[in-house]
Image (cartoon, rainbow, N blue to C red):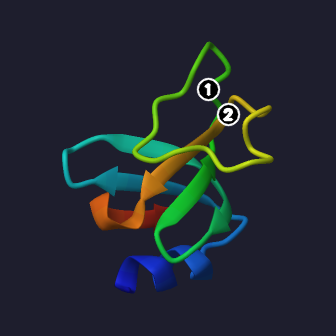
Amino acid sequence: MDAYYSCTRFMSQRVRIITRDGYVHEGRIVKVDRDHVYLETDRRDGPVTTSAFLPFGFRARNSILTLSLFTLLAIALI
């Protein structure tokens, strides 16, 4: 639950997220639920890979990255 509260605290802010497998993602948190954080990235060059499915309503926006809260290692404001 710590990742959930960290993400909700940084809602609508630009962050850098590091996952347990070492990947670094930067962007603005646009939504958080109990299982996922939705990060709007600057990436505009094709499909985005996710650690979960894209919920209805996000499918049209290619720049939304869905990350499982379970995979988050660290989050920081940038």
Looking at the rendered structure, the secondary structure element under dot 2 is: loop
Asked whether disc 2 touches disc 1, contact meaning CB atoms under 8 Å apart, the reply is yes
Q: Residue at x 61, y 26 (%)?
A: 43
Q: Position of residue 55 (x, y in %)?
A: 66, 50
Work out whether residue 72 can be spotted: no
Looking at the rendered structure, the secondary structure element under dot 1 is: loop
Vertical arrangement, residue 8 with respect to residue 25, above or below: below
Q: Amino acid at mark 1?
A: Arg
Q: Which residue is mark 2?
A: 63
Work out whether residue 40 can be spotted: yes
Q: Nearer the viewer, mark 2 or mark 1?
A: 2
Left/right placement of residue 56 relative to residue 43 reads: right
Q: Position of residue 26 (x, y in %)?
A: 51, 45
Q: Amino acid at mark 2?
A: Ser
Q: Which residue is mark 1?
A: 43
Q: Position of residue 58 (x, y in %)?
A: 74, 44
Vertical arrangement, residue 59 with respect to residue 40, above or below: above
Q: Residue at x 68, y 20 (%)?
A: 44
Spatial CA distance of label 2 from label 1 is 6 Å
How many marks overall? Answer: 2
Left/right placement of residue 53 relative to residue 76 reads: right
